Image (cartoon, coloured by chain):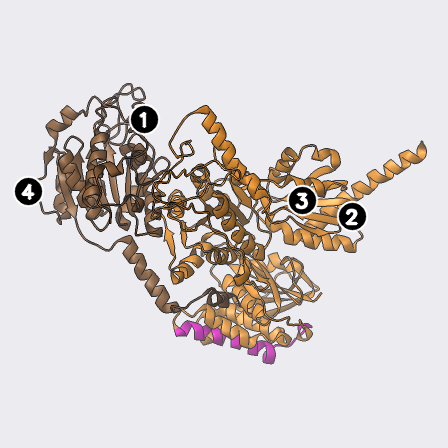
Amino acid sequence: MKKMEISDYKGKVKPSWCPGCGNHGVLAALKKAMANLEYQTHNTTIVSGIGCSSRFPFFMSTYGFHSIHGRALPVAIGLKEANPEINVIAVGGDGDGLSIGGNHFIHAARKNPNITYIMMDNEIYALTKGQCSPTSRIGTTTKCNPYAWTADRINPVLMALSFNASYVARGYAGDIKQLEELIQGGLEHHGFAFIHIISPCVQYNKVSSFEKMKEIIKPLPENHNIEDRVNAMAYAFAPNGPYTGLFYKVQRPTYEERYADIISKAKHLSGENYSIEDVMKQFK
Amino acid sequence: MKDLIIKISGTSGQGIISAGDILSYATARKGYYVTTYRAFPSEIRGDGKCYYILRISEEKTLTATGQTDIQICLDEDTIYEMQDKIKPNGVLIYDKDKAGELKEVKKDIITYGLPLTTIAKEIQDERSRNMAALGIVVGLLKNLHLEEQILKDIELRYKNKPQVVIDSNKKALKAGYDYAVNKLTRKDNFEKAEIKSTGAKLIMSGNEAIGLAALVSGCRFFSGYPITPATEIMEWLAKELPKFGGKMVQCEDEIAAINYALGASYAGVKSMTATSGPGFSLMQETIGLASMAELPVVVVDVQRCGPSTGVPTKTEQSDLFAAMYGTHGDCPKIVLAPMNVADCFYQTVNAFNFAEQYQVPVIVLSDASLGPRRECVDLIDTNNLKILNRQKPDLKEGDDYKRYEDTKTGISPISCPGDLYGEHVVTGLEHTQANAPTPANDIHRQMTEKRFRKLETAAGQFSKAKTYGSENASIGIISWGSTSGAVFEAIDKAKEKGIDVQALYPRTLYPLPTDWIKSFVKGKEVVIVIEANYNAQFKSTIVERCTHINRGAEVLEFLKYDGTPFTPDEILEEIEKVASVQTAKNDLQTNKHTHF
């Protein structure tokens, strides 16, 4: 396997994010984690939907699938099921993954495909120039919500835990070292790894800025038991959060492993030499 | 031609479909041709009525239509509904234990009110009434010698059920058979009914034919979401794909289903999804993505009455516009329409070949009258089918691979994750040849033309449109999909009455083969476009796409949108009407000439 440098992952397209955008930090952390694990570019695919953060695949030298709004996860899982040998990383924002694609998120979590899902949360729709998203705070005002935003926030970490994601972490784009560890842990994890990243928008979200987030985030206590789902949920719930770090990690069979069992069961029942001629018998 | 029409009807949950399926397998396996039609409500049990029609014959038949020879009614209501369709001297079998004395019976038919419930209860319980009734039919048609084969087919159908289920069904069938042979005072003539067995043939449903074609084409990934009447494709592939190392994945919705399939296709695996109207609407955005990102994917739409939830179990051909124009933007794709069960197989093989070769989404338009119906299919030589795969680039280190290279054919070789030196990003955004997103005017124009050029390249490869009837006919029919059986049968009947008609069935509906249509219309005085929708979707497409077609011949429409398929008689009536108008017009023309 080729030894990899961070520069090996540099894509043909220069990152188009605003200077100071949290996503730059996420890109750097992912590249570092991939280099640590010697991920080969030909064997890795970054899949995304639509949004600022979903431009991600263009900035990498790996295979990439920049799909449509909200559909990163189904594309990513289809790819993984078709060829489990490929390292599949889905990326996107809070609008993409929690609003238009919210349905896919919960089903991905319970199916447990061996993929990593990185959600860059800026609490706003930034590509469309600043409208409220499922993680925007009540009372936020935008051009679309000139008086106030009126819906409660989704808590992505709690949501992932509820639907039994087998690896759940939260990072902060301002702490690249911690991010690198959490992402690397997710890549190494055998199952659906969800990494929620607080990635402030410098253009459209003045409420949840780098300064503000830096003030309120805090690491999970060292003695937190990562196999204790209920406790992980309590930390996810905590009003004095948000906590960062690894909330939960547990090993359970992946979707591919469960399907491999089905294939061997089917092959066992039909016999190894089962052919199209055998299939035709049911119609004769 | 010798043929027999048997109809089984009753309330949903009484085992109508099971009885019909078992009888159709047994007849086909004895070497008779069988064509079927089934209609059922969407409730599993309830007040909905179920109908299963079988037409058993010596020669291949095109539809399961015509007057009934033997009618089995397992409930009371359908006795009154179905008896009008029974031929003179035809037989009506009903359950005397349930229906009692009949209120009104058609005079010229033979009725057998039999103790079906009693027979079934003596064995197990009344659930096997359907088999007792089937046994009666097998006994009445003693010369067809179905008794041994049908017992085998009962075993096959219930092979995963407890032995007691198999035994009670077999016993009920035998009891019915014995009753007909030994106890029944025969008033009918079916004792003499004879149909020649014509040897081995296949029997399958349209949905199974599509599943089989996918498997044979090398499809190893199917993702779907259950929906009537397409679910059978998913169920069949769920059973067969894993035996070949493939996967059938059930998704959370149809949007996920098509995106799973597209992800799998990007991984280099031939992929398909199947759905019906509502799911098809949900898939449209991703069909556009497949078109823009140039990824192969096959989408089957087993059409049902729409819009919205519509009539889930009934048939219509009203998704043609959605298939051709459903996606936003200029979206190259290919739309195919199989004509019958065998064609479901061959057009699905084509669908995979086109998708892989031209890197486009291919839509196969089946419908609720074609998907679930079983019919005999001539043997398929699976070893000699042309199966095509996508064109891969030949890459070495340092190559500057352009995923969307603009070529003469429009086709750019495609690498997939895992291939060395082939890394690239596919996207729904407009992009350069080297797959970088761009809003540049000249590039959007160039790439749109490149993508559509693939369809021009493909045009030479499309299956030739099927014609039927006399070439010199002055009346033409242009139609598509599942109407073919009724149309061809109507053309045969019209010929017997001295009216020549020729039909044209293009199997590729998009891009529309305008040349074939224009040359077909040449020489015709009038052309009737027949289709099962309100908007005359195919006719308006033809008129719009084939410039000045109206100058060559008058283009009429004959539409149906009540949820049932066309019958040959309806079409014959329309042909006769058009023919008489045509004759009158011609006479008028001739008279004018004489006058001057």
Q: Is residue B171 magenta?
A: yes
Question: Residue B141 got which mark?
Answer: none
Q: Which segment is the magenta one?
A: B163-190
- The chain letter under disc 4 is A
| Disc 2 residue crowd, few under 14, some 14–19, many 20+, Cα 10 Å | few
Discs 1 and 2 carry the same chain letter: no
Element on which disc 1 rests: loop
Residue B337: give x, y in percent of width and height.
57, 48
User: Which residue has dot 4 on it?
Assistant: A222
- Quote the CA–CA distance across marks 1 and 3: 49 Å
Q: CA distance from mark 1 to mark 2?
A: 63 Å
Report helix, strand or loop for mark 4: loop
- How far apart are the two marked residues, 4 and 2, measured between alpha carbons? 89 Å
Whether labels 1 and 4 belong to a single chain: the reply is: yes
Q: Position of residue B387 (x, y in %)?
A: 51, 55
Q: Residue B592 location in percent, x, y?
A: 90, 34
Q: Nearer the viewer, residue B415 or A224?
A: B415
Mark found first going from the N terminus, 1 or 4? 1
Residue B59 is covered by the magenta coloring: no
Crowding around mark 1 (Cα neighbors within 10 Å: few <14, some 14 to 19, many 20+) is some
Chain letter behind tag 2: B
**Local crowd size for mark 4, using a 10 Å CA cut-off: few (<14), some (14–19), many (≥20):** few
Q: Which chain is orange?
A: B
Q: Which chain is brown?
A: A
